[in-house]
Amino acid sequence: RIIIIALLLFGLTSEVSAQTDYQPTQSNLEARQWFDEAKFGLFIHWGVYSILGDGEWVMNNQNIAIDAYEKLPSFFNPTEFDAEAWVKMAKDAGMKYITITTRHHDGFSMFDSKVSEYNIVEKTPYGKDILKQLTEACEKEDIKLFLYYSLLDWHNDDYFPRGKTGNGIAGRQEGDWNNYIKFMKAQLTELLTNYGEIAGIWFDGDWDKVNADWHYDEIYKLIHDLQPQCLIGNNHHVALKPGEDFQMFERDLPGENKTGFGTAASDVGELPREVCATINGSWGFDLQDKTHRSKRELVQQLVRASGFGSNLLLNVGPMPNGKIQEEHVQSLAAIGDWLNIHGETIYRSKAGSIAPTDAWVSTQKGKTIHLHLLEKRPKASVIPEFKERIKSVKLFADKRAVKFKQTKAGLLMEIPEAAQNEIDTIVEITLK
Ligand code: FHN
């Protein structure tokens, strides 16, 4: 009996924290499909922390007290911020959407909020709403906008106790949790009423207080009531919860869980997927980070994500003056050049029927499979266990026919080394 009561209680408590009766509207289903096909987006981590050039966790990592950190906004004056330049840069990189931090863990709102004075308009010499400018630029360029919103807050009086993080900050041990939930709802209402159509809300920080009641049932409902098409994703690092519209994987391919805080293969759901990753080693601007990733690495990450049926949300951390580091601008342009030629094998594709390995992934549209060979191989290549009936095999680059044979061992192909590419040799297999 005790077990039954415990199960019932668990069922009841888990029900109150998710939107269990959620039925996505037609506009939401269409938005999911658009998202699934979009494949590539720009993640932007920007806040007053960029001034210190030590990443977005600087408040926690350098044990900066709340009252000292509160002085930071008075130095934030990004006079060179140009929303249109950011959006054009993303578009030229082949990206279809942007996800920007409206409020990160430091609790500073990068938009005009009437429910928190601790915001860019009130507290910085810049005094303008960057989100407004970005929404306008996105609309003009037909780029969709997602809003990152931190659940975890190192500044708000009512966020307590500081869970796994914030050890160094003079953290409160008590507060009014219901008030904190009310505050988040009020901010989300602002975000979803003052900035036109919002493509999605991207939550983060759940993992700081895993047993907290985040009132997702009310919060998700609020979002879907205000904007039914708005896609909800939550970087909680566990299986999907009712009310969510897409699933995200941080620095990990779906189900791989190489980072240790990712999602196990059994937790990968059927909703559209997104992998987020950094262009160097940091999310927020880091002056000393020189680990800029190469074009090969970045393109291959996009291709791998597609091979796992996922989007890639690639992050940059703009500088305090509002510009994006030149190295990153260049890298994004290089990905755009690659996509201009090979985008057909990525956009609108599904994970292909050839299972991914470290050496290759496949993407697919109907009867056309694109096999992406991500390492140079000997002339003769074998794809084991390939049993589907083939009409033709060609190189995507020049449509040259590839000699092939189907044997018990699988699909044997002859791809001369000279025809292979450092980044991605794409073989187009058409099925009968
Ligand atoms: O703590 C954050 C981190 O700063 C960054 O925002 C990433 C992006 O996925 N999410 C959290 C770590 O899981």
Image: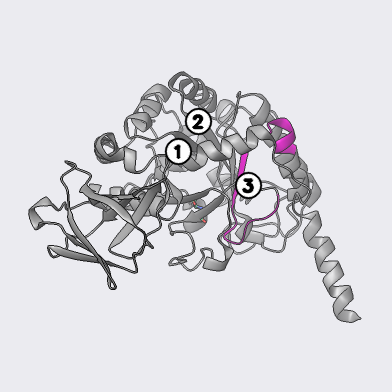
Q: Position of residue 192 (x, y in %)?
A: 66, 30
Q: Residue at x 50, y 20 (%)?
A: 136
Image depth: mark 1 or mark 2 in front: 1
Compared across the picture, whether 256 is left or right of 106 comes to left
Q: Earlier in the sequence, mark 1 or mark 3?
A: 1
Q: Position of residue 9 (x, y in %)?
A: 86, 68
Q: Amino acid at mark 3?
A: His
Q: Residue at x 45, y 38 (%)?
A: 38
Q: CA distance from mark 1 to mark 3?
A: 35 Å
Image depth: mark 3 or mark 2 in front: 2
Q: Earlier in the sequence, mark 1 or mark 2?
A: 1
Q: In which quadrant is the N terminus drawn?
A: bottom right
Magenta stretch encompasses residue 238: yes
Q: For mark 2, what is the residue?
A: 144
The image's colouring method is one colour
- Residue nearest the observer in this picture, 94 or 148: 94
Q: Position of residue 186 (x, y in %)?
A: 73, 35
Q: Is residue 87 above or below residue 212?
A: above
Q: Is residue 144 above or below residue 394?
A: above
Label 1 Cα crowd, 10 Å radius (few <14 / some 14-19 / many 20+): many
Compared across the picture, whether 9 is left or right of 412 comes to right
Label 2 SS = strand
The magenta-colored residue range is 222-242
Label 1 SS = helix
Q: For mark 3, what is the residue?
A: 155
Q: For mark 1, what is the residue?
A: 38
Q: Residue at x 60, y 57 (%)?
A: 236
